[in-house]
Amino acid sequence: MLSHSAVTTMLPVIDMVRARAFYEECLGLQPGALRPDGKFVYQVGGSALALFPKPGGTKAEHTAISFQVPDIVASIEALKSRGVVFEDYDFPDFKTVNHVCVLGSEKAAWFKDTEGNYLCLHEELAQV
């Protein structure tokens, strides 16, 4: 039923000005539109990303959104040059090397936005 529906990812933000600066200046998203209900919406690769004000922010410990990129290493370097700080993990079954973790058929790297939302880059590995 919903296979052909457009999808909007909703991310809570504490400080809209700070969040917009991060998404536009650090991530390079093109400014979108402020909606009457207070949401700020970006068009991203055929989908939408909406920031909405939430005084308490979010406490989610999971990835809120993942951006598929063709070259994760180049993307990490480009974002680091814009001030994005990547997470590193060292667990027995989950470890990053130079911010990248290989998970089955993809590589992934995580960072947080200014509001504490976990964001991810992922690159699909070539299928043999």
Image (tube, grey):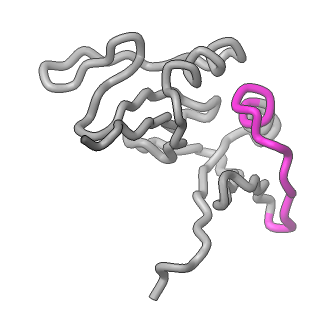
Q: Nearer the viewer, residue 113 or 100?
A: 100
Question: In x, y percent, where is residue 110?
Answer: 45, 28
Where the C terminus falls, by quadrant? top left
- At x 23%, y 38%, the residue is 104
Question: Is residue 76 within the magenta segment?
Answer: no
- At x 80%, y 67%, the residue is 37
Q: Which residues are magenta?
A: 22-37
Left or right: residue 99 versus residue 48 is left
Above or below 12: residue 77: above
- At x 42%, y 44%, the residue is 60
Above or below 2: residue 120: above
Left or right: residue 27 versus residue 60 is right
Q: Nearer the viewer, residue 70 or 1?
A: 70
Left or right: residue 24 versus residue 51 is right
Above or below 64: residue 27: above
Q: Residue furthest bottom?
A: 1
Q: Residue furthest left?
A: 92
- At x 82%, y 43%, the residue is 30
Q: Nearer the viewer, residue 38 or 95?
A: 95
Left or right: residue 79 versus residue 2 is right
Question: In x, y percent, where is residue 67?
Answer: 54, 42
Residue 123 falls in image quadrant: top left
